[in-house]
Amino acid sequence: MRAATEPAAQSTDTLVVTCRVPCSNVEHLELDVLEHTIYVTGPGGFAHELELPLEADMDKLEIELFRGFLELRAPRRSEDQGGLS
């Protein structure tokens, strides 16, 4: 069963994606980043894909786990950063 994923919340400068995970310690999760997709695996065969919008600056991705919710945050690329990758 896939965990519910919230669509990317968009503020003026930060993009945020959250999902529920089956643990409360980030060390029990494996995260692999490929372009704008984050592959999350964890205990009990848990596997989920999260995708941040193309305008997210993945070089500045921040990951936090709080009470069973994984939160991914990335700043929005500015216009002068040379476009989208």
Image (cartoon, rainbow, N blue to C red):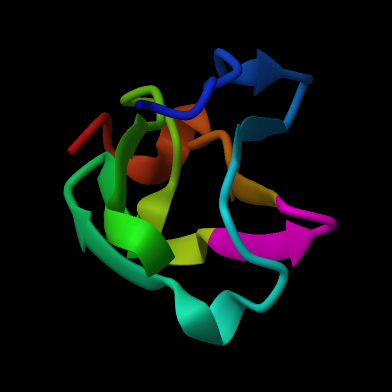
Closest to the observer, 60 or 64: 64
Relative side of 62 to 51, left or right: right
The x and y percentages for residue 20 are 62, 39
Q: Is residue 20 left or right of residue 5?
A: right
Q: Name the residue at 77% across, 21% down.
A: 12
Residue sitting nearer the eye, 59 or 19: 19
* Magenta-colored segment: predominant secondary structure: strand
Q: Which residue sits furthest front?
A: 44
Residue at 37% x, 26% y: name it.
2
Residue sitting at x 48%, y 29%: 3
Q: Position of residue 80 (x, y in %)?
A: 44, 36
Q: Position of residue 68 (x, y in %)?
A: 73, 53
Q: Which residues are magenta?
A: 62-68
Task: Give residue 22's quadrant in the image.
Answer: bottom right
At x 72% / y 32%, what residue is drawn?
A: 13
State which quadrant residue 29 falls in: bottom left
Residue 75 point in image, percent of width and height: 61, 44
User: Can you say which quadrant of the picture contains the C terminus?
Assistant: top left
Residue 36 in the magenta stretch? The answer is no
Q: Could you tell whether 56 is left or right of 46 in the image?
A: right
Where, quadrant-wise, is the N terminus in this rendering? top left
Residue placed furthest toward the right: 67
Q: How many marks?
A: 0
Q: Is residue 64 magenta?
A: yes
Quarter residue 17 falls in: top right
In this orientation, which residue lies closer to the viewer: 38 or 21?
21
